[in-house]
Structure formats: C-alpha cells, structure tokens
C-alpha cells in the first residue's frame, strides 16, 4: 500500500512539473538566441558563434558529420539550389561539423569534393552542439534577422528541402511562423 501511494505521489509530481515547465517559455515569443561558443574554421582559426549574422536576413545552421549519410544528402541537395535560394531570400547556410578529433580531418576534403559553397565550422568538442541541444543529426535550425532561432528540424528525406525553403521565404518576408 505504501509503495503504491509513493508511486502515485511521484507520478503526480512529475506530471505537475512537466505541465509547469510547458507554461514557461524562454521568452515571451518562445524564441532563443544563438549561444556564444568557440568553433574552428577549416583552416584552424577560432570563430565565435556570437558572430553569426547575415545583415538581417535568414541563416540556416545545419549540424552534420562526415559519417552521416542523411546529413551529406541534405547538404548536397541544398547545394544544388543554394545559389537560387541566396538570390531569392539572401539566406546564408552555415554547416557545423560535429566530427571529433579522429574524423575531423575528413571534413575539408569532403566539403571541397562536394563543392559546397557554405561557411563550414568544426565543433570538435561538441560545445556548440550541446549549447544548441542537438541530439540527432542532421539537425537544422533557421535563424531570423534578429539572430533568434525560429524553426528547427531533425532528419532528412528527399523533399525536406522544400519545407526548409518555404520557412526561409517566410522569414525573409518578415512573416511569423505558425507554432507546431
């Protein structure tokens, strides 16, 4: 009887805490700023994520790795239409490799071989990945002109890039996104 009562109280407490957390957005619009973290450029220089900006235009941040086939498929698919996206919306794509010290040497040859025209940074210690709460890759974020995260998505399948460009178009026009 005592075990059942304890279980019931714990269950009730968990439900109450979950509901209470749901009711408290990070800020009034539920948006989050990009955390400041140190990354490396492909040529070994330090880059702080606080400097991510695009003159008030949208930014796509894509977390990926050289060993992640869906990640490479996503970035390759976008590369085919990236120039058109830039001309239409002014969007900038930043690819954040989460390859560790064992596989990070593969990043530059892969990026050059695929001819990706993105800013590419290395998050070798996964500091930015943790700060952005990335658990699965590919994980894609859209940032508005105020450097606020307004949309995110994990995984990739053919056609996902169409949803992504539609989100970017709305952000570029200053429209707000429907909550989902």
Image: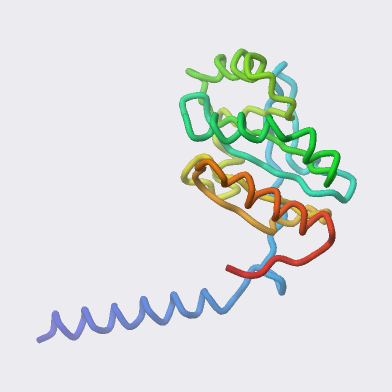
- State the scheme by which the image is colored: rainbow
The residue located at (74%, 26%) in the rendering is 117
Where 137 falls versus 166 (above or below)?
Answer: above
The residue located at (68%, 30%) in the rendering is 79
Where 117 falls versus 141 (above or below)?
Answer: above
Tell me: 121 left or right of 12: right
Q: Nearer the viewer, residue 155 or 146?
A: 155
Residue sitting at the far left: 1
Where 113 falls versus 123 (above or below)?
Answer: above
Location of residue 86 by image quarter: top right
Q: Nearer the viewer, residue 118 or 124?
A: 118
x%, y% of residue 180?
A: 57, 68
Tell me: 70 left or right of 79: left
Q: For the N terminus, give its image quadrant.
A: bottom left
Residue sitting at the far right: 55
Location of residue 5 by image quarter: bottom left
Where 104 falls versus 5 (above or below)?
Answer: above
Q: Nearer the viewer, residue 21 or 155?
A: 155
x%, y% of residue 11?
A: 29, 78
x%, y% of residue 155?
A: 49, 45
The residue located at (84%, 49%) in the rendering is 57
x%, y% of residue 136?
A: 47, 44
The residue located at (67%, 15%) in the rendering is 112
- Give the total of numbered labels: 0
């Amino acid at each position: 009887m005592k075990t059942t009562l304890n279980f019931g109280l714990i269950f009730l407490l968990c439900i109450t805490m979950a509901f209470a957390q749901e009711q408290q957005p990070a800020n009034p619009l539920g948006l989050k700023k990009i955390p400041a973290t140190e990354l490396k450029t492909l040529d070994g220089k330090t880059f702080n994520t606080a400097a991510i900006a695009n003159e008030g235009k949208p930014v796509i941040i894509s977390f990926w790795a050289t060993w992640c086939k869906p990640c490479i498929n996503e970035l390759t698919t976008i590369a085919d239409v990236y120039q058109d996206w830039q001309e239409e919306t002014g969007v900038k794509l930043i690819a954040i490799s989460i390859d560790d010290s064992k596989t990070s040497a593969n990043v530059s040859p892969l990026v050059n071989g695929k001819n990706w025209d993105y800013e590419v940074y290395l998050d070798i210690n996964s500091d930015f990945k943790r700060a952005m709460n990335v658990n699965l890759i590919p994980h894609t974020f859209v940032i508005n002109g105020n450097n606020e995260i307004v949309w995110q998505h994990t995984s990739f399948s053919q056609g996902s890039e169409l949803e992504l460009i539609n989100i970017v178009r709305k952000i570029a026009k200053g429209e707000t996104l429907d909550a989902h």
